[in-house]
Image (cartoon, rainbow, N blue to C red):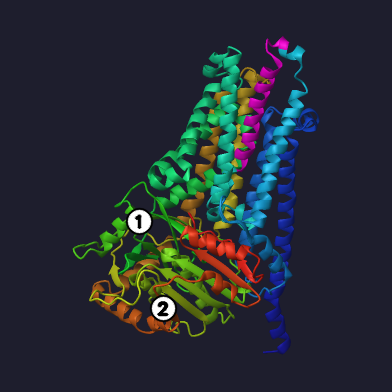
Amino acid sequence: MDPMVAERSSSAPSSRGGIMDTIRAVMMAVVIVVVSGWLFMWVMTPTRVYGQIWLPKIRADTISTFFGTQGATILLYTFPMLFIAVLGSLYIHLGKNNFSDIAESKGNKHKLAGIWRRPLIVKGLGIVSRIELAFFAMFIALLVWSFSTYLRVSFAKITPLSAAANGEQVWESKLDSAALRLGLVGNICLAFLFFPVTRGSSVLPLFGLTSEASVKYHIWIGHIAMTLFTAHGVCYIIYWAVTHQISQMVKWDKTGVSNVAGEIALLAGLAMWVTTFPRIRRKMFELFFYTHHLYIVFIIFFVFHVGIAYSCMMLPGFYLFLVDRFLRFLQSRRGIRLVSARVLPCEAVELNFSKSRGLSYTPTSIMFMNVPGISKMQWHPFTISSSSNLEPEKLSVIIKSEGSWSKKLYQMLSSPNSSVDHLDVSIEGPYGPVSTDFLRHETIMMVSGGSGITPFISIIRDLIFLTETLKCKTPQILLIAAFKNSSDLTLLDLLLPISGTPNGFSNLNLQIQAYVTREKEPITDNRKTHPTTVWFKPKSSNAPISPILGTNSWLWLGAIISSSFVMFLLFLGILTRYYIYPIDHNTNRIYSYSRKAALSMFFICICIATTASAAFYWNKKKGSMEINQIKNMEGASPTASPGSWIYNADRELESLPQQSVVQSTNLHYGERPDLKRILLERKESSIGVLVCGPKKMRHEVASICASGLAENLHFESISFSW
């Protein structure tokens, strides 16, 4: 080949990558500008400038026979975040195949990012980094600013004369005003509440977040919101009682605030709130789980309480949550092909599902699983232990028998008298970080306790792929695994898949320090110490796990959000122009607020259901050919003699892969790992530290990284705590 041609061909991907990086940088700049503007509107909302100058002018310019006064709220509060969601989908899609992170150099920006991600608070709020605390402080400042500004503006209008005109004392008028403003500030929390729990969000990845890692933000905001809403309701009850207006509690205005609806929403919120406290949630998780579905009642009656026009200020987060929730519903209706299970002596099972090659996910991703044979209602999250790169046609999860649900599953699969040859399973997901950047570290230290090793299996398998297939230089890996009993050591056998790693750990610099804390020496008995394999016969209707919206799922998500919202605007415009406007003429004093709210909510649900269903079934039909090919390949396999499969799988497991694990492992009996010594004695310039296990262990590792005793320790803020 001509050297010049070779040079041009080799530089072409780099050139395309540079153009793509530039496009994404411009898109990110637009995201920052729009989000900043949206936040600035929330800062200005309680001010006199906004209420008396900006809003009247904007309404005058936007009011029409199609949207009325609601148009201004949609333009200022709803449209910006839905635009960000659509732009975010495109941004993630363009960066999906960008491998620039693999070759990214270790620079000062990584050191700066590591400092900001370093834990600052370990107890109380949980493990909280500097940047998380900074943003949380800014959010609290926004709430304080809003409440104080609302009070300052409203109290300035309350005088003895104005109070007397209403038959009240000054303090009673101020109590009325404060009660209202508490509700308005609570609405700010509600505007942010649903973003963290939108699992397939295109907004969270823009800021380097996942829904799993953001659940704690939902918890914080939820506690603050319910505190404010409860104070809002209590203050109004006191106000009505002292002013002899207790009848207001049963008032449902046709064209105003509906107090009854607000009280129903508050009661639903309180029922949810009470069951979220740790002591109740841990002891009665099912009560917490089922009670939390009252969010539907809360939202519906909240909209009835304040009206759809005002609710549009809080709409974006809930709108995106609805899109995600309906897509999850569609995905969960499909039966999944469960191919096999590895049953371990430590009362754990590895479930192996068939998957399409088009489904890719990053290490530490999770999926939610439902087994109707155990419980039709319960969904449980599990970390995916396989690598979509190393195992393109298989997806695995490891389930340790710890709770009642997992114990039933283990008993079902491990019982000698069991004749289970099929298991109905539904899934939602996978969900996880859009990308990972572990290669920037010289060393990765993984600290696990018990079944906490499962998230690290996917990381190790992915690093095996990088070093064996892509020939990338990978960091040194130190896995510190603490187990209660020696039987739990069989979890280490799952570090490698049954097949696909002929060289084992040959090119991977891996050290395993395994600690058995409750035994002084190895215990030997006649029980089988190696995993056994159970093979299933999937139904013909069962399908491999595949992307819910196909290989271009982010583009489809953007299309669903944009098209459903445009459809909603069309319906709303037609409804307003040809039905509401002839009756009301934009006076907002004739047509029922509740009817308008009910119709608007109905339109939102219809538009989301229609567009999401169309996208889902289009991609399902498009992927049916690949699904049939996978089924035919499985049908051509020797399923008629599964016993030979079990023998071969176990024999292979006991040979080279297991030997690779044994050679890399140092066993310690009767002691716990001295984490402080182990972490601080490492002298590499950059060490990524990940921990998964009991709460005490997580807090200990986070405290060491936060102590400042070693600047080379970078605590990775990946959450494993669904």
Which is in the foreground here, disc 1 or disc 2? 2
Alpha carbon separation for disc pair 1 and 2: 37 Å
**Label tally:** 2
Instruction: Determine if residue 231 is in view.
Output: yes
For numbered disc 2, what is the local secondary structure? strand
Quick check: 162 left or right of 94?
Answer: right
Q: Amino acid at mark 2?
A: Leu
Return the residue at label 1. 425
Position above or below: 689 against 411 = below
Crowd band around label 1 with a 10 angstrom C-alpha radius: few (<14), some (14–19), many (20+): some
Instruction: Determine if residue 98 is in view.
Output: no
Q: Is residue 191 magenta?
A: yes
Report the span colored magenta.
164-192
Q: Nearer the viewer, residue 285 or 253?
A: 285
Quarter residue 556 falls in = bottom right
Q: Is residue 456 magenta?
A: no
Position above or below: 10 against 115 = below
Return the residue at label 2. 667
**The N terminus: image quadrant:** bottom right
Position above or below: 722 against 164 = below
Crowd band around label 2 with a 10 angstrom C-alpha radius: few (<14), some (14–19), many (20+): some
Do the numbered discs 1 and 2 sit on residues whose CB atoms are within 8 Å? no
User: Which residue is at 57% across, 35% downward?
Assistant: 227
* Circle on res. 358: none
User: Which residue is at 67% across, 26% downward?
Assistant: 178
Quick check: 597 left or right of 2?
Answer: left
| First in residue order: circle 1 vs circle 2 | 1
